[in-house]
Amino acid sequence: MRSTPDTYTCAVDSTRERDTDLFESEQVAAGDGSSGGSGGSGDDWDGESPADGGSGRREKKRNRKVLVAALVLLLVPVLAVGGYLAWLNHIVTNNVKQELLLPDDGSAGSQPTDKNGNVVVQPAGNGTNYLVVGSDAGPGRVGGRSDVMVLVHVPADHSAVTLIHFPRDLYVSIPGKGKNKLNAAYAFGGPPLLVKTMQDMLGVRIDHVALVGFEGFKSMTDAVGGVDVNVEESSNQPPYVFTQGVQHMDGAMALAFVRERKQLSEGDISRGRRQLAFIKALMLKTLSKDVLTNPIKLKDFTEAATTNLTVDQKLDVGTMRSEALALRDLRGGDIRFITAPFTGFGTSPAGASIDIVDEVKMADLGDAIRNDELNAYK
């Protein structure tokens, strides 16, 4: 465990030094005028006259010390909490990496464009869009892959969150590369090209990007003591058996759950729904009082969540903190899942299995996101 920052240690140590003096017994002799005098000395803070005698001065001095002691006892936990939050902020700042994940502001690809190349105007105050890209470097797998692509829309009033899963096999137009699977955009040009591809497909601006490995999800799950996931479709993946209904999972079990697709009825589409169910469970557990009010769990989760996290050049720690606080009252019913619309399965000219985009419904989805009206989208 990392040591706490100096601000925390110093605050507590200086308080302890003062406590010794505050609780010393009174040594003032009766009638000793040296302990206080006329002319507005500190011992006469309550306005009483020196004529009250030595016993009055002793009582006033004792009351003042009790008052200061009480204030210090109240301040100690406040300073401790402040130091703890500063420590968490230190962890996040040290761990999170920032990279150029968004298209450059000055480039032609920084704004969404329609099929004619015209910029799609974005209304003001229409919420925030985060693209979360998960990469699964499982056993024997190397190279850049975007196995999970989830667009998270947070409305302007922070009353809900919508998670939109984009299957990696969606057959789409990739700027400068022709038509290919969606995750090929990531392979061709990294996150900036993936962002540009999705912005043009939807006519929506993507504000921020976060890259996280599947191992990071595993660590986060263990840090919060496991999660309760709604299993939509059963599967048998030794040593794990998944049955329909809510099932408690630790990190290793959750990782097996989100990786499986061959036993599921719709392959990668079903796997995407599993991934969304897991993300929802992890979000709800993280925002629960069980985690937020437990310093050890919160610290462990913060470490796990940020150790392998890379965010775009515009997403700073202050923004992440304020967004998390704004969403602290979310409940299960406030989180919605959507799978990007497609009409069915097919084969590309190159012979690859693909998901065929439903162009009409995709346009409707883009309109709902752009106008912050996903609550009415069906």
Image: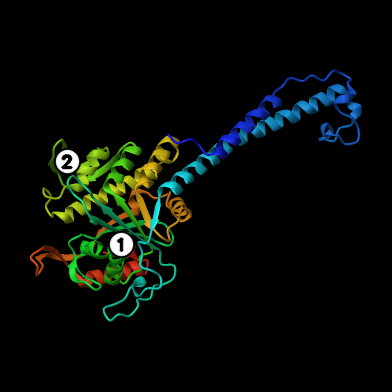
Which mark is in front, 1 or 2?
1
Crowdedness of circle 1 by 10 Å Cα count: few (<14), some, many (20+)?
many
Q: Left of 236 or right of it: where is 245? A: right
The chosen color scheme is: rainbow
Left or right of 33, for residue 177: left
**227 on left or right of 156:** left
Mark 2 residue element? loop
The picture places residue 132, in percent across and down from the top left corner, at 31, 56
Residue at 24% in and 45% down: 230
- Residue at image location 84% in from the left, 22% down from the top: 55
Residue position for label 1: 191
Query: What amino acid is at disc 2?
Result: Thr
Labelled pair 1, 2 in contact (Cβ < 8 Å): no
Residue at 76% x, 26% y: name it: 62
- Name the image quarter holding the N terminus: top left
User: Which class describes the residues within 10 Å of circle 2: few (<14), some (14-19), or many (20+)?
Assistant: some
Q: CA distance from mark 1 to mark 2?
A: 35 Å
Q: Which residue is mark 2?
A: 243
Picture coordinates of residue 318, whole percent (x, y): 48, 54
How many badges with numbers are in the image?
2
Q: Earlier in the sequence, mark 1 or mark 2?
A: 1
| Image location of residue 179, percent across then percent down | 18, 71
Disc 1 element: helix
Residue appearing at x 43%, y 51% in the figure: 324
* Horizontal and vertical percent position of residue 149: 26, 58
Q: Nearer the viewer, residue 72 or 330?
A: 72
Where 120 falls versus 32 (above or below)? Answer: below
323 above or below 5? below
Residue 2, by quadrant, is top left
Using residue 59 as the reference point, say whether residue 330 is left or right of it. Answer: left
Query: Where is the C terminus found, in terms of image quarters?
Result: bottom left
Residue type for callout 1 = Pro
